[in-house]
Image: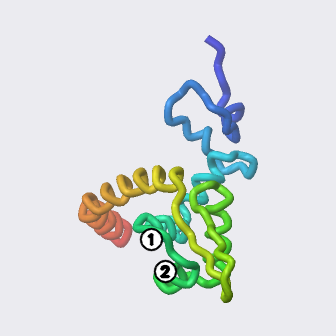
Amino acid sequence: MTEVRTSEYVGSCEVTDMPNDPFQWDAREDCEVRQILDRIADKWSLLVMALLENGTLRFTELLRLIDGVSQRMLTVTLRQLERDGLVSRTVHPVVPPRVDYSLTDLGRSLNATVLAFVTWTESHQSDIAAARARYDESVMS
C-alpha cells in the first residue's frame, strides 16, 4: 500500500471516492464547491431565498423586509443568486421600472435543504445553548 501524504490532498477540490471528503470543498479560490457553499451560506442569501419561497417580491419589498441589509448589499446578493441560477429577475417595461425576483426550480430545491438545516437547528438549540454554557463555565474557571 502506497502512503499518501496529507499535503498531496490539501487544496484539492476534485471529486474523490471518499464520501464527504472535506478536501472537495476547501478554501481555495478556484474551488467552485467552496464558492457555492460560501454563497448559499451567506446570511443575506439565505434570508432572500427564504422570503422568495413564499412568492415573487420586488426589490423594495425585499429591502424593507430584511432588517439591516443595505441597498448595495441586497443588489450584490440578488445579482450573485441570479448568476448562480437560484433566483430569476423579471424587468417589467413600465415607468417607473418594476423589477420582480423569484426563486427558480434550482433555488426551491436548495430551500428544501436549508429548511432541513433550520429544522435541525431549532430542535437542537437548547442542546447547543447548554453546551455553550458548559464550555464558557469551563473556560472561566
At 62% from the left and 55% from the top, the residue drawn is 85
Residue at 63% across / 49% down in the picture? 34
Amino acid type of the residue tagged 1 in the rendering: Leu
Asked if residue 112 shows in the view, the reply is yes
* Residue 14 position by quadrant: top right
Q: Earlier in the sequence, mark 1 or mark 2?
A: 1
In the picture of the structure, the residue carrying the numbered disc 1 is 51
> Residue 115 vs residue 40: left or right?
left
The answer to whether marks 1 and 2 mark residues whose Cβ atoms lie closer than 8 Å is yes
Across and down, in percent, residue 28 comes to 71, 49
The residue carrying pointer 1 sits among few (fewer than 14), some (14 to 19) or many (20 or more) residues within 10 Å by Cα, namely some
Residue 40 to residue 79: above or below? above
Q: Which residue is mark 2?
A: 66
On the picture, is 66 further left or further right than 130?
right
The residue that appears at 62% across and 76% down in the rendered structure is 99
Q: Is label 1 or label 2 in front?
A: 1
Instruction: Judge from the rendering whether residue 98 lies leftward or rightward of residue 137; answer left or right.
Output: right
Query: Residue 91: image x %, image y %?
Result: 66, 73
SS at mark 1 in the image: helix
Q: Quadrant of residue 77?
A: bottom right
Name above or below for residue 10 compared with residue 99.
above
State the CA–CA distance, disc 1 to disc 2. Answer: 9 Å
